[in-house]
Image (cartoon, rainbow, N blue to C red):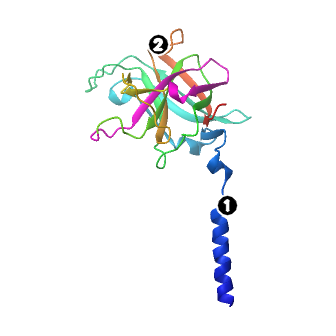
Amino acid sequence: MSRFRSLLQASLSATKRALTWNIEDVIPPSEKYVFRFNSKEELKRWHLYSDSQYGGLSSASLEIADSGTGSSGIFHGNLSSDVSEATKWRLKRSGFCGMRSNKFDGYIDLDAYDTLAMKVRGDGRCYISTIHTENWINSPAQMEDNSWQTFVYVPKDQWYIAKIPLDQYLPTWRGNIIDSKLEMNPARIMAMSLSINAEGGIPGTKSGPGDFRLEIDWIKALRTP
């Protein structure tokens, strides 16, 4: 009899757990943090790249700064349009730097959200926000993730929350917009990145070679009303 009661209790407990649901599984929260730049551990989730890999002379760093009221990430460096005379690469353009997150463990699902927001403080330059999704546009032989990009203007010397609708991101291939009607799959995001070019961007913003500095507090997904 005691064994029967134990089996019955175990069955009832399992059934109760199966019937118990989390409201967030049905209605996700209105916002979801993707990155918080509040520790040196956070930097291990990112890596830097620049034209220096191909003979350019630009440079970039990423570090955590403590202001006394909290920590934030600082992406900074120098953009150069020059190319090393010793380079073996046929570099068509220089003057770019970027920071890209390592690939997520699998992918992150932002299908319940419509906007990407980031709290930043900058230098009046225009930066490029990129979302990398699972490869399905290119041929099976092409192993690169699909890239979706948009410009982000960051006002100088003041904290600013940039809110970018996901449908504002355009499909690109090696920095060039793909002239085709395609839609991002926000349920299969593999990584994200922020980058800067010496030239281009939103007309009227600061551009050209020289120093750059972007301070980042957090990046999150939003579901707007």
Quarter of the image where one finds residue 121: top right
* 174 lies above or below 7: above
Q: What amino acid type should be assigned to the residue bearing mark 2?
A: Gly
Nearer-the-camera pick, 12 or 44: 12
Name the quadrant of the C terminus. top right
* 189 lies above or below 203: below
**Badge 2 local density, few (<14 within 10 Å), some, or many (20+)?**
some
Task: Name the disc covering residue 208, or none.
Answer: 2
* 156 lies above or below 181: above
How far from the left and from the top, in percent, is residue 70?
Answer: 71, 36
Quarter of the image where one finds residue 110: top right
State the residue position of label 1: 20
How far from the left and from the top, in percent, is residue 214?
Answer: 57, 25
Residue at point 53% right, 43% down? 109
How far from the left and from the top, in percent, is residue 34?
Answer: 58, 40
Q: Nearer the viewer, mark 2 or mark 1?
A: 1
Q: Is residue 67 left or right of residue 181?
A: right
